[in-house]
Image (cartoon, grey):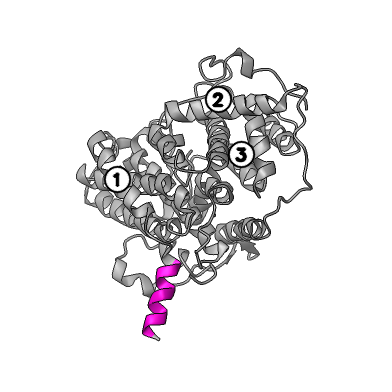
Amino acid sequence: MATVLGLSEAIREGFYLSDNSAKLYGPRYNKKIHRKKPKWNLCSMHAHSKHSSGGFKLEDRRNFQVYSSLVANQVGEVATSSEQKVYDVVLKQAALVNRGLRPELDVKLELSISDSTNVLKEAYDRCGEVCAEYAKTFYLGTLLMTHERRQAIWAIYVWCRRTDELVDGPNASHITPSALDRWESRLEDLFTGRPYDMLDAALSDTVVKFPVDIQPFKDMIQGMRMDLKKSRYKNFDELYLYCYYVAGTVGLVSVPVMGIAPESKATTESVYNAALALGIANQLTNILRDVGEDARRGRIYLPQDELAQYGLSDEDIFNGRVNDKWRGFMRSQIERARMFFQEAEKGVTELSQASRWPVWASLLLYRQILDEIEANDYNNFTKRAYVSKAKKLMALPIAYGRSLIPPYSVKESSLSKSLS
């Protein structure tokens, strides 16, 4: 799984939280506490990126057919596309941010411990420690945020990581649908001010302070359910929904915490659109990087219809055949991921300046993975594409420089005035 808005790289890359991990939880944390330009539309970004013909060129983007918001199923009934489902969630989250409200009535965090202030401080500090140890680059970026915002992002980071670990961690083989149901029930308690442990307490406090809705969190758990029962995706519409569940969701919960720049002229929906695009881009990059690793687990996170258009089959994936067919297919997939990154860039500059650096760093670093896949001659079966430490260090000052650039919408508005 992966997540977005800077958390994406950090959460995906390499650590697991487990109920048996004293190093990350510690006995004291096991105690139960009592109880993200014009308004986005369906034609804006996915008309070109979801075109299923596979190979395409950047100059052809304006000629792509619009991907319909409705699709017909086998019995002739009309069903909502994945894009429309996600769009509906985005509109709801943007509306909450515009109103600055939580979807539920305000609730107070119920703590059985007398000094709740110290409890919450300890909970947030622990989240920060986990983030600092396992997501160093991202953690450094959060230090530029206001105290309250960075604490909230740490809390979101830890919850997403714990959720991801349920199906990707060392105990994943023992996870059942009922276990995920229990995790979702625990989430609902958390949102009503009844956290189960110290780490939950930090997120429970966060969702009271910021207009964060529970739906994206539930959708992430739904992505975990998909991984338990689904190992093939017949088209990009199916894959898009999966990418939203496991990565785009974090963009939706992070935007209200990271904040939109006061001087931004962009609509809230367009900022959420960009956050979603970054999540999709990062997850597509993960998928392309990990083709060989996933195949060894019997999984293929690639559109089956597009593989067929290039004359490829599951057998080619499992045998790790790098040939011209595979190279052509990979070029089309990489191009799609880059288009999502391009869409994401428009929204990063609209965030609060203090929040931009970790997001720019994530975007620049993750996009380089696509370059490394190309450098490996598209062999993502036996060669793992990774960005060297030197390249990562070089990206940080570039990301910081870009974080100082004023909102894209302000520049666009100034340009329009000068031309009028």
In the displayed structure, 357 sits above or below 386; it is below
Q: Quadrant of residue 174?
A: top right
Q: Is residue 30 part of the magenta span, yes or no?
A: no
Can residue 325 be seen here? yes
Mark 1: which amino acid?
Answer: Pro
Query: Is residue 417 magenta-colored?
Result: yes
Q: Amino acid at mark 2?
A: Arg
Task: Decide: few, some or many residues near mark 1? Use Cα within 10 Å; few <14, some 14-19, many ≥20.
Answer: few
Q: Residue at x 38, y 31 (%)?
A: 296
Question: How far across and how far down the image is residue 162, in percent?
Answer: 56, 30
- The residue indicated by pointer 2 is 126
Quarter of the rendering containing residue 183: top right
What residue is at 38 percent from the left and 76 percent from the top? 415
**Dot 1: what SS?**
helix
Callouts 3 and 2 close, C-beta under 8 Å? no
**Label 2, label 1: how many angstroms apart (C-alpha)?**
28 Å
Q: In this view of the protein, which residue sits in the foreground, 404 or 387?
A: 404
Percent position of residue 318, x then y: 34, 36
Q: Which mark is residue 40?
A: none
- Residue indicated by mark 3: 221
**Residue closer to the observer: 84 or 393:** 393
For the question of whether residue 176 can be seen, the reply is no
> Is 196 drawn above or below residue 251 in the view shown?
above
Give the structural element (helix, strand or loop) at label 2: helix
Q: Which residues are magenta?
A: 409-419
Find disc 1 in the rendering and name its residue.
397
